[in-house]
Image: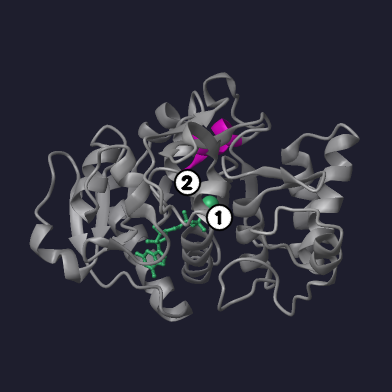
């Protein structure tokens, strides 16, 4: 079985661990979001790709869900002593090594897809991890506060401001001119099914779908998604602030409607949202627990997604 999954960071990575567990024989290609990428301290940082790589490769900080396990912060303290910021973006010593290797390879002329493959040589995530594009795409958020109306990098809005200042709009800058990375469209075309894990519908999945060609390729497949919204709220993070910015209600059903029946064939919603689980026009809805509490529970969710895809493919 050939599976393609689109993934952001924590929600995507945790789900993928369950998917790999429940379908060990499957050939899984993960198309990762690079809209969160940022350059800091002269280094290129790809938070979502790294979260997937570390999580599947066994190097993740489990409680936090991002960054490395057994991390130390000497470099950060030294940078702070020089008053070199930003202080709001936490990078540990082990994590820094990844960004140094990546930046060195990018500076030598390798595309991000080749760099990601090289990093995965170490981490062996058990899936093929592809960035959505080798081109530069960065999510920016338009806010308005005491300093006036301006656009800031998504990371500054998310990490520094905790999405506390409402987003007037969110844009994937560069997406219109980006090309899918080598292998992305081929993997989707060759896939038996495409899964949308419970990743942020706006700044994770939405950004991947904004790369020209990806949405149409995915829409041609049997696509099953897992709701990141449980009981009318994001399980963690501030996806509600992103949904509000694009005028979508924070509910499992509204997210499915936002993806639309042209893209989505099946949608898993949590039992807490079961009252809203009648099929949407053209989208089959199924209700089950969707909290990824441990590997077994997560594998069961992934299994349910595969079952629904199988049913809809028949
Ligand atoms: P990020 O890039 O690190 O923000 O991660 P993603 O975009 O991949 O995933 C973020 C989404 O994961 C959030 O909107 C959460 O609601 C969702 N999420 C986190 N934990 C769970 C869970 O246990 N179950 C479900 N269904 N969604 C979850
Ligand atoms: Ca992210």
In percent of the image, x 21 and y 41: which residue is there?
257
Question: Image quarter for residue 135?
Answer: top right
C-alpha separation, residue under disc 1 versus residue under disc 2: 18 Å
Magenta range is 184-191
What colouring does the structure picture have? one colour
Could you say which is closer to the camera, residue 40 or residue 143?
143
Q: In the rendered image, which residue does mark 2 sit on?
A: 204
Residue 119 place in picture, x, y as percent:
78, 54
Using a 10 Å C-alpha cutoff, classify the residue at mark 2 as few (fewer than 14 neighbours), some (14 to 19) or many (20 or more): many
Q: Residue at x 46, y 64 (%)?
A: 15
Q: Is residue 186 magenta?
A: yes
Residue density around tag 1, few if under 14, some if 14–19, many if 20 or more, within 10 Å? some
Q: Is residue 204 left or right of residue 55?
A: left
Question: Reading the chain from its start, which is encountered first: label 1 or label 2?
Answer: 1
Report whether the residue tagged 2 is closer than 8 Å to ligand 1.
yes
Numbered label attached to residue 160: 1
What element does badge 2 sit on?
Answer: loop
Q: Residue at x 13, y 45 (%)?
A: 280
* Residue 92, position as x, y percentages in the image: 75, 67
The residue lying toward the viewer, choosing from 249 and 284, is: 249
Looking at the image, residue 246 sits to the left or right of residue 196; the answer is left
């Amino acid at each position: 079985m050939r599976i393609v999954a689109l993934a952001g960071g924590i929600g995507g990575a945790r789900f993928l661990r369950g998917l790999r567990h429940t379908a060990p024989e499957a050939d899984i290609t993960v198309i990762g979001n690079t809209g969160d990428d940022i350059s800091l301290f002269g280094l290129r940082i790809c938070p979502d790709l790294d979260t997937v790589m570390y999580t599947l490769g066994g190097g993740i900080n489990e409680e936090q869900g991002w960054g490395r396990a057994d991390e130390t912060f000497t470099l950060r303290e030294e940078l702070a002593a020089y008053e070199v910021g930003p202080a709001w973006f936490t990078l540990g010593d082990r994590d820094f090594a990844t960004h140094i290797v990546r930046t060195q390879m990018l500076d030598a002329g390798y595309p991000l897809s080749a760099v990601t493959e090289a990093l995965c040589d170490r981490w062996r995530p058990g899936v093929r991890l592809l960035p959505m594009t080798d081109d530069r795409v960065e999510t920016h958020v338009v806010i308005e506060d005491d300093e006036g109306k301006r656009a800031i990098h998504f990371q500054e809005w998310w990490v520094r401001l905790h999405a506390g200042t409402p987003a007037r709009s969110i844009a994937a800058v560069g997406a219109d001119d980006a090309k899918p990375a080598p292998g992305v469209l081929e993997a989707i075309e060759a896939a038996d099914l495409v899964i949308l894990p419970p990743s942020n519908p706006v700044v994770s999945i939405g950004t991947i779908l904004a790369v020209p060609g990806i949405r149409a390729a995915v829409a041609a497949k049997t696509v099953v998604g897992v709701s990141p919204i449980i009981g009318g709220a994001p399980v963690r993070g501030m996806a509600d602030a992103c949904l509000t910015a694009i005028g979508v209600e924070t509910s499992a059903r509204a997210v499915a409607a936002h993806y639309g029946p042209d893209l989505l064939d099946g949608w898993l919603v949590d039992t807490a949202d079961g009252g809203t689980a009648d099929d949407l026009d053209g989208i089959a809805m199924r209700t089950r627990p969707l909290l990824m509490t441990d590997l077994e529970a997560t594998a069961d969710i992934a299994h349910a997604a595969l079952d629904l895809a199988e049913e809809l493919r028949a």
